[in-house]
Amino acid sequence: MRTARAIFIKQIWDTLKNRMMLVQFIIFPAIAFIMTELVAKPSEDITDSIFVTMFAAMFAGMTPLMMTNSVIAEDKEHKSLRFLVMAGVKPWEYLLGIGGFVLLACSLMSVTFGLIGGFSGVDLVKFVLVLILGSVASVVLGASIGIFSKNQQAATATATPVFMILAFSPMISNFNDTVGRVTSVLYTQQVKEIVNNVDMSLTQPLLTILANISVLLILFVVAYKKKGLRA
């Protein structure tokens, strides 16, 4: 745990010094707030939470993936990951250290989304929980892409179509049933379903999200062991 904590603390300082990283965390909640206040609330035909649920689902599928992917690709490019692997840092320690700060920031933003959308009590807990689980899956996927990539440029090129599919396919599924059936296995689809209807049964969606996380964790461990020393 000391190793994970050291990586976690280092990541906090690195992020605080990088304004562009901080902007990536707040941009979606900021847009959701503006659209809610200026468009949704003044209109009688639009529900107050529509923009919050839309941007919250996109946030969980995009921001943690891109943040983690960028950080790990940078570690590879600067040879930091190679030194950590040679020093005996385990995959879970590295992932917990790097992803811990990203998840902490995502958790705070998830609560912010919920409050902007007017959720409270049990509904707020469900809303925040599913966004955090979606963020966990995105962190692990972003970490895997980062390790498989040669440098930051390659990592961004690989991650961009991935997060575009994850973030926008659930939105497209609203208009196309075939797309909906295909994307039902994706964690982002389940996140979208729950944030749009927190009263629905959570059993099947949560099992799908957890299955996604399990598969992605295996992918990360394999990537870390095979690619870490080649950084």
Image (spheres, grey):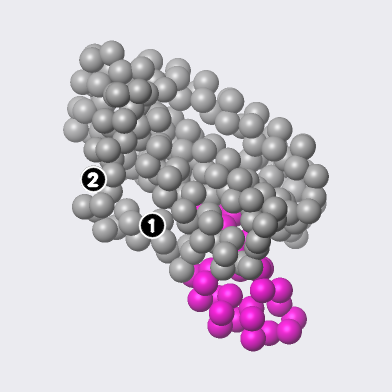
Which residue is located at x 75 percent, y 56 percent? 197
Residue 31 x, y percent position in the rendering: 49, 70
Element assignment for label 2: helix
**Residue denoted by label 1:** 24
N-terminal of the pair, mark 2 or mark 1, is: 2
Q: Nearer the viewer, residue 162 or 29?
A: 29
Residue 17 x, y percent position in the rendering: 21, 52
Which residue is located at x 55 percent, y 44 percent? 132
**Residue denoted by label 2:** 13
Which residue is located at x 41 percent, y 61 percent? 26
Q: CA distance from mark 2 to mark 1?
A: 16 Å
- Label 1 sits on what residue type? Gln
Disc 2, disc 1: CB below 8 Å? no
In the image: residue 64, left or right of residue 9? right
Q: Which span is picked out in magenta?
A: 31-59
* Residue 152 is at least partly visible in this image: no
Q: Nearer the viewer, residue 160 or 52?
A: 52
* Residue 183 is at least partly visible in this image: yes
